[in-house]
Image: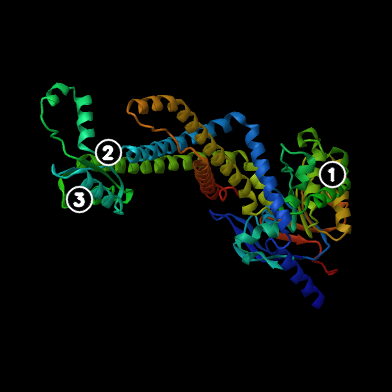
């Protein structure tokens, strides 16, 4: 589902965000991406969502070669990659419902279909009762759940999360991870960047470790795979 | 493996633009965006009103000038005698010959109308207007000739063709003297020509200012919606989708500005109507200001809408690409 072949990302000025990184993530996998701040976690996610392009090497997502995707195709690629951010990135002048509905509105879905799918997504994250609330009236954990609902409402095959539990206490973090596991069970491929080692050690999933822009360890690269 | 390929193909089809969007939903979406953009303008009434007023004034000026010019040009048509040719007939021409000549001229395609002033009429008029009744009474015979006042057809009222007509009439039998105030006709045409060009120049400049006003307003709106644009791009909004509400904003500004311009000109006309009528009355003219009709309204609306749309298109094109999610 996600293929990195010798991918290097060099920023203007010579700093390398990623150096020669290769890995494959199969459809339906749930993978953690970890490493120190500045090790290249965000850069890697940005390459998958085409927020940035690789300098060298090839990135393929869901069969598409991102290196050769034209500018006009970027929006259609992003519709297939749900993205979750540490700072939620919600629109504060719109209700929870409208925030979650955005990907469907953008994709041009009909009114009824949007209502049905948004409520299903909100129900999934346990916020159906708050659909008319503005994001500022919600707690940090609730805002994150709105962000998650928005990322999965259009049922993308791939979901990326960048430090989704960064600001949350352990109990809320576990709750969020539980949600991710539920999505994974229905076949969504997940790549979650986090430095909460405590949390991921308890989850027993594949882990990619980045160190100084290089892939230092892949827990699936052992003899079992 | 084959199944996987087919899956891939299906996905590729889904990614192609618009294939999944039905026309009715697309139209409905446009209507929604148009109304939402209108709603956004209404929710910031003060700044919206100011923008619309500025656009209105910028559009009202050339519209008003054009209208005045149009009216003045009509005026030259109504102005009996201004561009007409006076044919002074030879003394010996009698009534009958005069009538024959008049009839012949009437059938000339270059001539709109012929008015006959007999020598008796002329004498009477002269007696009344000149205040020299006593002196005229002393004359034994009427010294005045029969006169034909020839009004050229509009196709022959321009200076050159009027002059050609004058020369032709001069050659006719029984004509002593043909007179045309050519100098006046030339000056009048030159003046309207300049005024016309002035209106075009002014309209161009003010049209340009409308473009800049709308462009700048839209630029500020884009900046205010920075976060929204960024997030919309993140979740896969196309540039066309993001552009749409701003284009509608520009269109609304232009349309309302055009309507405001029309109202302003209408108001000015109403205020001027009475004094103009009085002035025209003093000159024994039935001149009235007009021309502020449906056609004019559609013109300012169309012009305003087009300028608004173009202005926002330029602003959106320039500034939308600067906002990319990070």
Q: Position of residue A1 (x, y in %)?
A: 77, 65
- For marks 3 and 2 on the same chain, the one whose residue lies earlier in the sequence: 2
Percent position of residue B44, x then y: 62, 31
Numbered label attached to residue B169: 3
Rounded to the nearest whole Å, what is the CA distance between mark 2 and mark 1? 96 Å
Classify residue B42 as left or right of residue A31: left
Pointers 1 and 3 in contact (C-beta within 8 Å): no
Estimate the spatial distance between the alpha carbons at disc 3 and disc 2, rounded to whole Å: 16 Å
Percent coordinates x, y for residue B22 in the rendering: 73, 59
* Secondary structure of the residue carrying numbered label 2: loop
Image height of A65 relative to B44, above or below: below
Q: Tell me the crowding category of disc 2: few under 14, some 14 to 19, or many 20 or more residues within 10 angstroms, Cα based.
A: some
* Res. A8 image quadrant: bottom right
Q: CA distance from mark 1 to mark 3?
A: 104 Å
Name the residue tied to disc 1: A173
Q: Secondary structure at mark 3?
A: helix
Judge if badges 2 and 1 mark residues of a common chain.
no
Q: Is residue A10 above or below residue B170?
A: below
């Amino acid at each position: 589902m996600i293929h990195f072949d010798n991918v290097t990302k060099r920023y203007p000025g010579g700093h390398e965000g990623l150096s020669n990184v290769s890995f494959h993530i199969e459809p339906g996998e749930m993978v953690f991406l970890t490493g120190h701040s500045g090790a290249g976690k965000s850069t890697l996610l940005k390459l998958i969502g085409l927020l940035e392009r690789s300098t060298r090497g090839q990135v393929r997502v869901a069969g598409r070669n991102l290196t050769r995707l034209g500018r006009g195709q970027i929006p259609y690629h992003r519709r297939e990659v749900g993205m979750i951010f540490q700072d939620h990135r919600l629109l504060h002048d719109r209700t929870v419902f409208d925030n979650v509905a955005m990907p469907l509105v953008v994709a041009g879905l009909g009114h009824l279909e949007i209502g049905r799918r948004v409520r299903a997504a909100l129900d999934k994250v346990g916020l159906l009762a708050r659909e008319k609330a503005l994001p500022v009236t919600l707690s940090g954990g609730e805002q994150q759940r709105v962000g998650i609902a928005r990322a999965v409402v259009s049922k993308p095959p791939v979901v990326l999360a960048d430090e989704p539990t960064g600001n949350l206490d352990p109990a809320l973090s576990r709750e969020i991870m539980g949600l991710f596991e539920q999505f994974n069970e229905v076949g969504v491929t997940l790549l979650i960047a986090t430095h909460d080692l405590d949390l991921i050690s308890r989850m027993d999933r594949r882990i990619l470790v980045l160190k100084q822009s290089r892939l230092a360890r892949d827990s699936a690269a052992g003899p079992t795979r | 493996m084959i199944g996987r390929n087919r899956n891939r193909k299906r996905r590729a089809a889904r990614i192609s633009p618009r294939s999944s969007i039905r026309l009715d939903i697309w139209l409905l979406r446009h209507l929604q965006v148009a109304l939402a953009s209108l709603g956004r303008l209404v929710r910031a009434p003060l700044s919206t009103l100011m923008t619309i007023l500025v656009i209105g004034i910028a559009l009202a000026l050339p519209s008003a000038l054009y209208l005045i010019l149009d009216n003045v040009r009509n005026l030259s048509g109504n102005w009996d005698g201004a561009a007409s040719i006076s044919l002074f007939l030879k003394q010996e021409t009698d009534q009958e010959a005069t009538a024959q000549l008049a009839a012949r001229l009437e059938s000339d395609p270059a001539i709109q109308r012929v008015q006959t002033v007999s020598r008796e009429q002329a004498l009477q008029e002269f007696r009344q207007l000149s205040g020299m009744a006593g002196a005229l009474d002393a004359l034994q015979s009427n010294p005045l000739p029969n006169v034909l006042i020839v009004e050229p057809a509009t196709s022959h009222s321009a200076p050159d063709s009027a002059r050609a007509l004058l020369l032709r009439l001069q050659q006719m039998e029984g004509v002593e003297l043909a007179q045309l105030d050519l100098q006046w006709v030339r000056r009048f045409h030159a003046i309207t020509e300049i005024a016309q060009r002035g209106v075009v120049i002014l309209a161009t400049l003010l049209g340009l200012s409308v473009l800049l006003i709308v462009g700048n307003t839209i630029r500020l709106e884009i900046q205010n919606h920075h976060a929204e644009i960024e997030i919309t791009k993140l979740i896969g909004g196309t540039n066309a989708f993001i552009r749409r509400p701003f284009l509608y904003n520009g269109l609304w500004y232009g349309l309302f500005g055009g309507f405001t311009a029309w109202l302003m000109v209408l108001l000015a006309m109403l205020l001027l109507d009475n004094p103009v009528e009085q002035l025209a009355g003093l000159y024994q003219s039935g001149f009235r200001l007009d021309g502020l009709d449906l056609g004019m309204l559609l013109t300012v609306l169309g012009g305003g809408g087009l300028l608004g749309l173009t202005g926002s298109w330029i602003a959106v094109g320039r500034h939308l690409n600067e906002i990319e999610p990070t």
